[in-house]
Amino acid sequence: MNTLQDLRSTLDAHAASVHDHAALARSSAVHGRARAIRRRRFAAVAATVAVVALAATTVPLLSRGSAPVPADRQLIGKVAPATLTSLGYTYDFENGVEGGEKHATIRLRASAEPRLVTWASDAADVGILATAGALHLRSSATDFDDFVYVAPGESGRWTIRAGGAAAAIAVYELADEAPEGITVEGITFRQQVGDEELIDAVIGEAGQSDLTFQVALPASGLRVAELCAGVPDGFVANVEVDQRGVASSGGCGDDTFDPGSGSASWYDAGDLGEPGTVVTVRTWVSRLHDGEPVALDDVRLGLAAYSLAPPVTTVAGWRVPDVVEHDGHRWGFVGSNSSDVGARRLVVRRDWDEPTLLVSHVRGIRQWGGEVMVGDGVTSGGGAFSGVEDVFGPSGGPFVMNVRTGLTDRTALGVSLYQRLD
Amino acid sequence: MTTMTISGEVTVSTPGFEEFVAARSSALLRTAYLLTRDHITAEDLLQTALTKAYLAWGRIDGNPEPYVRRILVNTYSSWWRRKWNGEQPTDELPDHGSTDDALGESGDLWDALGRLPRRMRAVVVLRYFEDLTEAETADLLGISVGTVKSQASKALAKLRIDPSLAEQPAPIEGETR
């Protein structure tokens, strides 16, 4: 039997083991996070303004250097499709350009809604470059049969380089058709996000500031996705499941696109009860740190419950899903590479034929002072982490993970590989 | 921290954000570590709480520490999962960091603390590390004093702690910290 003094001593000892190495950098890190939040808020507002301006003045969508083409979808002798589909959403042809002698270029201003950019060329393959000349990808799809996703708020210039061959770009804008799922007044929680299935959702009308529904816990875990928009400063949107796990978010913007893939909370099966247990999911608006529901006219809330799929495998101690979404496409798991436990280095050679999405997994790095080089010069901290790296084509050097410092006998490095499903 | 005298009353004004971070964030980091049991997660939790506080700094009157601490604990309680594109770690805390052998005597108790539900762990940290009273703990967590009592009681039972064996009494309600 322990005593309270044992408990206090344990807490004190572990608290004393914390060495605050990051103290000096903390303030600037917080400022950086705050700037990012403000940028997102600003982008949402600016995007709305930009759309209004475009509608009012019919500012040309297209940039210099490429000739605009009427919306007959005929570009360099090829017909662009009337619609494209990405993650269940339909996009309508908006406009296109034919390139000059060297390339086709299009500039997109920020928009509140996502867009797709597709291309065609007489060349066997083309390079797609994003703003600032960074190579986005090389593609052998040259008949408007592939696209890149331009997220809401994103702006910039897109260029197709075809080695002197004819090239064209077409832009598609979000259509009114809703994807499969639950839709209310233009807001949709998709039926499927990655390999997660929608169980149920509720989307309130404008001004409905308190939403509740019940859901039976799925066997493999529950994900709750929330939507909050129009929540002013001084107020927060709260989420709770079964009167637990209250999350408060004051960072609600005005973006209501595809909330199912956005901010969310995950609950493992067992955290809340046995599968089949009915729990209540609720979201509501309150004043900051008050908790009492308040009614606000402009607020828009939504809440969805998704069933997690069982992981397809475990890599370096991380559960890896079978399907993920990235850049407007669905990607399926095709394999993984793992180091031996305790190994310092993992080299993944590009022995694939198609563009492949790499996801890194690291664990067992000493917490303080640990550094892992992941891919091309990226240094991360110690501990355990995982994240999407990038899409890698078939050619080029290997993808390397290298523990510079902080190697332990528990260190594990891994990479999951995904290829396009659509 | 600066003070102002208004109409004969001394009023404590809100310190600058940088000043506050420099003075108090190390202490908050220790609390975050006891809650998360993971150094990296603790730093992330603290920065998340500080960011939320920073964005609302102009609306804070007086000492901001209770406000920041409340954000910290409530954010921790809501941190069920963080993930990218559908991936989840196999464990709630994927890496518990290195074990300090010097703490071996209390290792079992530390492990048992890690198995407590989050809200219960928060109650334990606030009551027995921060030495908050039951009322202060209830206020910070936004729950009733009765819930704090029951959560603390259940936590002590799970930790196999008999309050009657306490070598040092727990703080009395209202006691000066």
Image (cartoon, coloured by chain):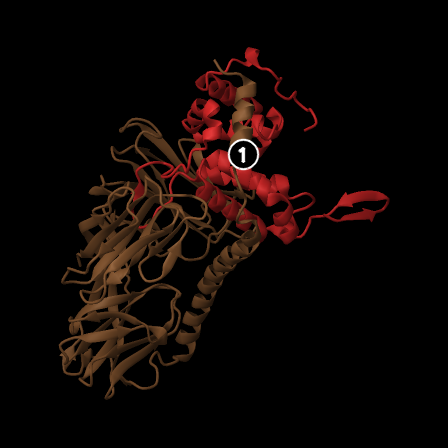
Chain colours: A brown, B red
Residue at screen point 47% across, 23% down:
B105
Residue at screen point 35% across, 64% down:
A113
Q: Position of residue A375 (x, y in %)?
A: 31, 59
Q: Nearer the viewer, residue B29 or A182?
A: B29
Horizontally, residue A203 falls left or right of residue B139, namely left
Q: Position of residue B78 (x, y in %)?
A: 44, 39
- Residue B137 visible (yes or no): yes
Residue at screen point 29% across, 36% down:
A221
* Residue at the extreme bottom of the image, as rendered: A101
Q: Nearer the viewer, residue A30 or B74?
A: A30
Q: Quadrant of residue A325?
A: bottom left
Element type at mark 1: helix
Neighbours of disc 1 within 10 Å: few (<14), some (14-19), many (20+): some
Residue at screen point 37% across, 39% down:
B95
Q: Which residue is mark 1?
A: A15
Horizontally, residue A109 falls left or right of residue B66, namely left
Q: Position of residue B79 (x, y in %)?
A: 43, 40
Q: Quadrant of residue A43?
A: bottom left
- Residue A237 visible (yes or no): no
**Above or below — where is A168 with respect to A233?**
below
Instruction: Tell me the kind of residue under disc 1.
Output: Ala
